[in-house]
Amino acid sequence: MLHFNESLEKIATLQVETRKTKTLFLLDSLGYVLAEDIIADHNSPELPTSAMDGYALRHEDMAMKRLKIASINPAGFVLKDEVLQGTCIKTFTGSLMPQGADTLIPIENVVVEGDEIVIQEAVSKGFSVREVGENYAKEELLIPKGTKIDFPQIGVLSSLNVVNVSVYEKPVVAILSTGSELLALGEEQTNDAQIRSSNNYILEAIVKKYDGMPLQLGCIKDDKRSITDAISAALEKSDIVVTTGGVSVGDFDFVKDIVLELGCEIVFKGVRIKPGQHIIVARKSDKFIVALPGFAYSSTVTALLYLVPLIAKLQQRDFSLHLVKATLKEPFIKKAKKAEFTACNVSLLQGEYFIDFQGKKLGTSAILSNMLGNSALLFTSEEDTSKNIGDQVEILLFD
C-alpha cells in the first residue's frame, strides 16, 4: 500500500489530454471554470476620471482660495469647456476630467458663494483623479484560464463587454453503490439485514458542492455481472465513475477485479490511510474510476481526498487540500501507523482554530454522524505520534 503523500502526488501528476469546453452567456457561467485567458482590450479608465463629486481645477490655483465656477460636467457627457486659470468646473463621480484640470477638490472642502467656490481645505495635486489604466491596463492578463468564475469575475468580464465566455464543462460523475443489503430512499425494508444506503446520496451532494455534475445510478446487488454491466455503462455516460463497496478482500468484493477486466489502468490500489485503505483509483483514457470503501465515513473521507481533486483536474483547476493549523483542547491518542483522518469539533477564536472531540463516537468507519456539527478532520501522518493538550496539529476543512 502507498504512503498517503505518494497517493496525493499520483493524483496531482495525472495528465489529462482532453477537457470538454462550451460557451455560456456570462451570467450563466457562475460556478464554472474559465477555459480561456481574459486579457484587457482597453485601459480602464481610458481617460483621467473623477472619483468624487467636486470641482475640477488646476492645483496651482488652489492658493487663490476663490475660483469662478465656469461650467458643469455631468457623468456621461463629453465637455468641451476647459479649466482656465482662476476657474473651476463642477464635476461628478465618473465624469471625465475637463481639459486643463489636474485635481478635484471635494464638495465638502468648499463653500459656494454665488458663481464662485471658496476653498476651505486644500488637497494634494491629483487628488480624487483616476489615472488612465488605474483599474486595468490594455493587454493586462486579468483572469487566467483555470479560474473559477465568481461574482468578482462576473463584474470584470462585464466591464470588458464579454457577453459569452468559454468554460470547461463540469465533469459528469456517475455514482453507484454496491451491496445486496442496501435500500434506496423510500424503498420498503423486507428483512432485518437490510440497511439504508447513504453513500450514493452523500456522494451526490459532494459532487454538487465541488462543481461536478452527478449522475445518480443508485444501488446494485453484489453480483459480478450486474456490477460489471453497471460500471461499463457508467463509463460510457460519464467522466468519472465513483463506486462504494466491493473493494476489500471478501468473497463478494468484485469491484477491484472488474476494474481490470474493463481494461482500466490502475493508478494506485491501497493507501496507508484510516479510514479507507482499500481505495482504488483507475483510468481508461481520460475517464476515471474511483472505487471507495463501503462504510459511510470511509467513503466520505476518501471522496474528499481523491474524488474532489479529480473533479478539479478535469476542469484544469489547481487543487490542494484545505489543511490549516489548529490547537488541541484535549489529548489525541494515535491509534494506527497510518495517515489518520479523525472527526473533530472545530472552533475559531480570535483568528485561531481549536479542536476537541466532545460528542464524537468511537467505533468503526461507519459512524457518519461524527461529521455532523462544526466538524473538521484531524490529519495525522503515519509518522506522527499521540498529541497533548496545546499541541499544534493540522485539520482538513471541508470548504
Image (cartoon, rainbow, N blue to C red):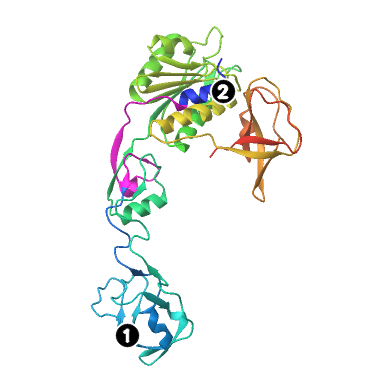
For mark 2, does the 10 Å Cα neighbourhood hold few (<14), some (14 to 19), or many (20 or more) residues?
some
Instruction: Label 1, secondary structure: give it.
Output: loop
The answer to whether residue 305 shows anywhere in this view is: yes
How far across and how far down the image is residue 56, in percent? 36, 78
Q: Nearer the viewer, residue 61 or 131?
A: 61
- Identity of the amino acid at label 1? Gln
Q: Quadrant of residue 312?
A: top left
Q: Residue furthest front?
A: 60
For mark 1, does the 10 Å Cα neighbourhood hold few (<14), some (14 to 19), or many (20 or more) residues?
some
- Identity of the amino acid at label 2? Phe
Task: Check disc 2 and report the residue beneath it.
Answer: 4
Please state if 396 lies on the left or on the right of 27 as rendered. Answer: right
> Tag on residue 85?
1
How far across and how far down the image is residue 336, in percent? 68, 20
Q: Nearer the viewer, residue 73 or 87?
A: 87
The magenta stretch is: 12-38
